Structure formats: structure tokens, C-alpha cells
Amino acid sequence: MGRIRSVRRITHRTSGPAAILSALVIALAACTSPTPKATHFSPSPSSSKSTGPFAGWVNGIYIYPDLNAPAGFVPDKAVRADPTCPRTERIVSEHELRASGYYIDIPAWMPPGAAEQEGAWAGACGTKIIVVSRQFGVADTGASIGLVLRPGARTAQFDAVAQQIEATTVNGRPAVAIKSLTGDGSGNTVIFILTGKGLLQVGAYDVRFTDLKRVAESIE
């Protein structure tokens, strides 16, 4: 964990396998990460006939398509808008991360050929850890899997139409699944899970959704 890396580099790519993390351009969420007061639980929006990008609450998680939040809604406050936070996040040591309780273990189940590409990494605003990341690749396939935890967050940025989005549960926890539009599962898929530690993103590129769900269910 000695390398200093930008959270934006880890969490925001626009194309290729690394696009699985594009939902977390706002990974530098607020030092305080207040829970939005307008939270409500919505059913799956898959019955919607809208073909535009989806924005709304699903299972207590607010999904929206880009950096510009819808009118009247303020997502998890941006770190750079908070004067108490430095412009550049502090890199968290492995010892501090493990002691914080936010450390992400390697999932108990991974697809055959999966191996870690980027070890557990975390950034903090002052003493508060705001993002934790761990990345994996699947040998000889070009597929990849990314885990990102944002303590205290309730919002997730991801470009998707309503037909892709499904309210679900993972190990009894509220979750939102965003599936690929292709039948073979190619492209980006993701599961956002509300955990006791924060919003956990389990995302993948060119991994079958059934396998991604199995990965998510194997995370303690």
C-alpha cells in the first residue's frame, strides 16, 4: 500500500474493463456523509418505459447518472466542497485500514482464474476513511471485478436505464442490481449493497451476473 494513487484514477474510467468503477466519481464523498432526509424505499423501476438515464431511489439507495444531481437533491456531499477537507485525500496505511473495521477481505468465492490486480487501498479526509478499494482481474479473459466501499454513503453514480435496474437483497441486506443490456453479460454490471459499514459496490466487466452475485454473497 505504499503507492500513492488518485481515488479518481481508481474509481472513474470511461471505457474498457475499468469502467466498472465509473459509478464512483464521487468516491470522495463527504467527511460527514449525511444520510439524505428524503430516503424512501422504492420497488424495482424495471417496469418503467423510460429510455433515458435513470435517477431515483431504489431499496434505500439513490442511483443517478452523472455528476449533476437532479434538481432539489444533494447527494453525499462532495469532499472538495467541505472546507475541513484537504484538496487531496490522505492515503491510509494498511495498519490503520485494518484497525478501522473498513478493510475489505478477498471474497470467499471468485471466478476461476481471478487474481488480485490492486491490493486493498483507502483514502481519508482527516481521520475519516471515505473510500476503500480492491481490484481483481480474471486471467486470459479481460474480465475484471472491483470492490469499493464508501462509509456512510447512500448514493451511487451509474449510467443505466430503468430496465437494467432491479431491487434485490444480498445476504438479507438491501441492494440494487444493475445488469448488462446484453444477454451474455458482456459490459458493465454492478451490485450496490447497503451494509453496516456503508455502501459497498461489487462491480464487474464481462463477468456473468450470476457469478457476480455469487461473489457479492461470499463477502463477509
Image (cartoon, grey):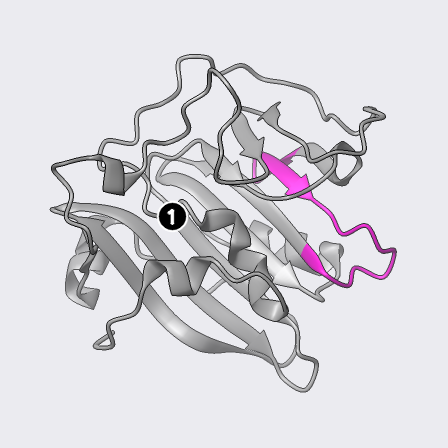
Position of 161 with respect to 201 (left or right) is right
Query: Above or below — where is 40 with respect to 215?
Result: above
In percent of width and height, residue 185 lies at 79, 59
Mark 1 crowd level (few <14, some 14–19, many ≥20, 10 Å Cα): many
Residue depicted at x 80% and y 35%: 163
Amino acid on which disc 1 is placed:
Ala
In percent of width and height, residue 182 lies at 84, 55
Query: Above or below — where is 220 with respect to 34?
Result: below
> What stretch of residues is rendered in magenta?
168-188
Q: Is residue 59 magenta?
A: no
Residue depicted at x 16% and y 64%: 95
Query: Above or below — where is 200 with respect to 172?
Result: below
Q: Is residue 181 magenta?
A: yes
Nearer-the-camera pick, 110 or 81:
81
- Asked whether the viewer can see residue 110, the reply is no
Q: Label 1, on which residue?
A: 27
Residue depicted at x 41% and y 24%: 74
Q: Could you tell me which secondary element the residue under label 1 belongs to? A: loop
In percent of width and height, residue 105 lies at 39, 61
